Image: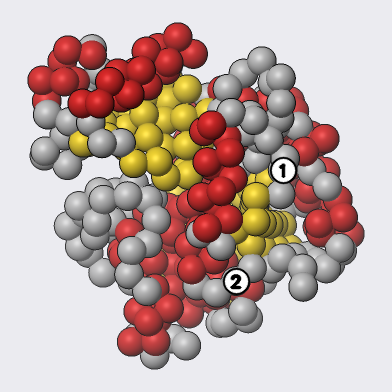
């Protein structure tokens, strides 16, 4: 049995620690934002964790990895291509992914020079998450990590825009997309963030117009990609380039366009407890619908339901049975 969905992305271990505000102040951590840190800072913060003050939870993270976890819990067979080092965190990452139903197909790298990527996330009593991310070895992913044979049965492929910051990541993408399409599969990407789009606009446009069969972005990402202030103009340009175009709009209706069909899907507004993972789980619900051949509107509704579930609690992965939520809405 081949994999139904294969993801390529950053393999980042989330190290989640509940702390009082005074610890943030003592450690010099900026509250409520994501900060990139270097290896020395990462090791100092990890040593601080190890001093026994906090009970940190290890949860494998990274955008595509979170999406695959959601898809696995919905019952699809999934595999993840990402780079970890052969260190404690790397082995834990591969083990935890497998425990969550996703095969981690890339062997951990020994003598890597760089340790496994991690994001040290401090959660204060008010629910704010302060993220300290060391990009580490996952950013070194390249085409040698992609085994074209994995795609022989024509699976769906899902990529994250963040990996485009390195040439190796671009090469890995292109190899995976070519292998996927040669086997009759469907390749797609999440644009990841508007700054990422700004940095790689030409490359992303070529991807959207070329090897990508479906592309997910939010309002800011689509407007940045086509450098227009009007969303409808951006989506018209996107639809001319790509077969399936998905636009999420935070609390507003999502817009889905496929081969001339256009649907809007209402989002049930809920007050987020923790917005982390909303986009990743929207992608999981959506891709589940597409892979299983549901109508476009149903796939969009599945995405919205999965996103609403994940923002109702802390953490970027589902806690309730999302399939049961789909059934309750009459979608399965």
Q: Residue at x 22, y 64 (%)?
A: 269
Q: Residue 222, image x and y in percent?
A: 51, 46
Q: Residue 112, image x and y in percent?
A: 69, 21
Quadrant housing residue 15: top left
Q: Is residue 160 among what the camera can see?
A: no
Q: Residue 255, image x and y in percent?
A: 46, 64
Judge left or right: residue 155 versus residue 314. Answer: right
> Mark 2: which secondary structure?
loop
Q: Quadrant of the N terminus?
A: bottom right
Q: State whether residue 272 is above or below residue 269.
A: above
Quadrant housing residue 294: bottom right
> Mark 1: which secondary structure?
loop
Q: Residue at x 30, y 36 (%)?
A: 56
Q: Residue at x 37, y 74 (%)?
A: 321
For disc 2, the marked residue is 76
- Residue at the farthest top position: 40
Q: Is residue 107 among what the camera can see?
A: yes
Q: Are circles 2 and 1 on residues that touch, CB within 8 Å?
A: no
In this rendering, which labeled residue sits more in front, label 2 or label 1? 1
Instruction: Identify the disc placed on residue 106.
Output: 1
Q: Residue 148, image x and y in percent?
A: 86, 50
Q: Residues within 10 Å of mark 1 (few under 14, many from 20)?
A: some
Q: Earlier in the sequence, mark 2 or mark 1?
A: 2
- Residue at the farthest front position: 52
Instruction: Identify the disc placed on residue 259.
Output: none
Q: State whether residue 243 is above or below residue 82.
A: below
Q: Nearer the viewer, residue 201 or 66?
A: 66
Judge left or right: residue 74 versus residue 82. Answer: left
């Amino acid at each position: 049995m081949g994999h139904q969905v294969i993801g390529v992305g950053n393999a980042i271990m989330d190290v989640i620690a509940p702390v009082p505000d005074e610890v943030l102040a003592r450690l010099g951590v900026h509250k409520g934002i994501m900060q990139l840190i270097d290896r020395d800072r990462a090791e100092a913060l990890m040593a601080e964790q190890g001093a026994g003050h906090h009970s940190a939870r290890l949860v494998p993270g990274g955008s595509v990895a979170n999406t695959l976890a959601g898809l696995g819990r919905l019952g699809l067979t999934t595999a993840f291509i990402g780079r970890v080092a052969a260190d404690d965190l790397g082995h834990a990452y591969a083990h935890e992914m497998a425990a969550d139903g996703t095969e981690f197909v890339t062997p951990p790298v020994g003598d890597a020079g760089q340790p496994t990527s991690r994001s040290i996330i401090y959660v204060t009593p008010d629910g704010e998450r302060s993220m300290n991310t060391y990009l580490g070895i996952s950013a070194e992913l390249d085409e040698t990590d992609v085994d074209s044979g994995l795609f022989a049965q024509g699976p769906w492929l899902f990529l994250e825009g963040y990996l485009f910051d390195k040439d190796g990541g671009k090469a890995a993408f292109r190899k995976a997309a070519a292998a996927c399409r040669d086997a009759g599969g469907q390749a797609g990407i999440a644009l990841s963030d508007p700054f990422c789009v700004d940095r790689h606009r030409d490359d992303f446009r070529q991807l959207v117009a070329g090897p990508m069969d479906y592309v997910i972005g939010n309002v800011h990402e689509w407007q940045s990609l086509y450098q227009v202030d009007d969303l409808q103009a951006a989506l018209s340009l996107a639809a001319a380039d790509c077969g399936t175009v998905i636009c999420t709009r935070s609390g507003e209706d999502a817009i889905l366009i496929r081969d001339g069909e256009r649907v809007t899907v209402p989002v049930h507004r809920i007050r987020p407890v923790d917005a982390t993972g909303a986009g990743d789980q929207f992608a999981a619900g959506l891709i589940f619908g597409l892979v299983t051949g549901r109508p476009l509107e149903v796939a969009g509704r599945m995405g919205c339901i999965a996103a609403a579930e994940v923002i109702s609690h802390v953490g970027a992965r589902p806690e309730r049975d999302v399939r049961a939520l789909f059934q309750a809405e009459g979608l399965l």
